[in-house]
């Protein structure tokens, strides 16, 4: 991560849904393999829901650094917790890893649709998902005149 990105992350205070979320974030951040934006976004996201905090070992393998996509089919999952898990997976893996759990093309497409912005953000967790995105992409979370100019924008 560049020093600009580090500065952007430190400058903005992270919002948490609860004290338990904040505690989870700082505790689990010590257990992940790397202190990068991928892991920070993953841990932040998985801390949003009490269900995902409680079932973290069913979702993520701290030793290998791999997500456990099969967790999406476990009985403890709720409508909200599957959104949290999919958002976390998306930010961590840069994609839709659970799509590969299906052999049938139609099932793969259906699973892929569950990762869309509308599908994930239309819930009470949306402000916290936005926070996770800012953690993952700190360099894009605020208006950057230089970056805007590179894409042909004018002030």
Image: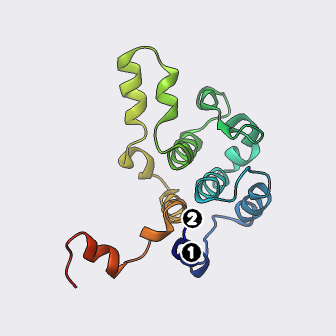
Work out whether 17 lies above or below 107: below
According to the picture, the residue beneath numbered tag 2 turns out to be 1
Side of 34 relative to 97 (left or right): right
Q: Quadrant of residue 47?
A: bottom right
Q: Residues within 10 Å of mark 2 (few under 14, many from 20)?
A: few
Work out whether 59 lies above or below 153: above
Q: Residue furthest bottom?
A: 155
Q: What's the distance in space between the residues labelled 2 and 1, CA to CA?
A: 7 Å
Q: Quadrant of residue 71?
A: top right
Q: Position of residue 16 (x, y in %)?
A: 64, 67
* x 48%, y 58%: residue: 126
Give the mark count: 2
Q: Position of residue 125 (x, y in %)?
A: 52, 56
Residue 36 numbered tag = none
SS assignment at label 1: helix
Q: Position of residue 5 (x, y in %)?
A: 53, 71
Check the picture and name the quadrant holding the C terminus.
bottom left
* x 38%, y 27%: residue: 110
Work out whether 20 lies above or below 42: below
Check the picture and name the quadrant holding the N terminus.
bottom right
Residue 3 numbered tag = 1
Q: Residues within 10 Å of mark 1 (few under 14, many from 20)?
A: few
Q: Position of residue 3 (x, y in %)?
A: 56, 75
SS assignment at label 2: loop
* x 54%, y 60%: residue: 132
Q: Residue furthest top?
A: 104
Its colouring scheme is rainbow
């Amino acid at each position: 991560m560049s020093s600009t990105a580090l500065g952007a992350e430190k400058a903005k205070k992270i919002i948490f849904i609860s004290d338990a979320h904040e505690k989870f974030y700082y505790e689990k951040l010590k257990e992940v393999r790397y202190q990068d934006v991928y892991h920070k976004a993953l841990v932040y996201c998985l801390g949003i829901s009490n269900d995902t905090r409680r079932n973290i070992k069913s979702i993520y393998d701290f030793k290998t650094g791999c997500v456990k996509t099969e967790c999406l089919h476990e009985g403890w999952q709720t409508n909200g917790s599957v959104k949290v898990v999919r958002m976390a997976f998306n930010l961590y893996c840069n994609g839709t890893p659970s799509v590969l759990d299906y052999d049938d093309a139609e099932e793969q497409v259906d699973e892929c649709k569950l990762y869309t912005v509308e599908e994930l953000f239309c819930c009470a967790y949306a402000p916290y998902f936005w926070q996770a995105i800012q953690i993952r992409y700190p360099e894009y979370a605020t208006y950057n005149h230089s970056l805007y100019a590179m894409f042909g924008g004018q002030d």
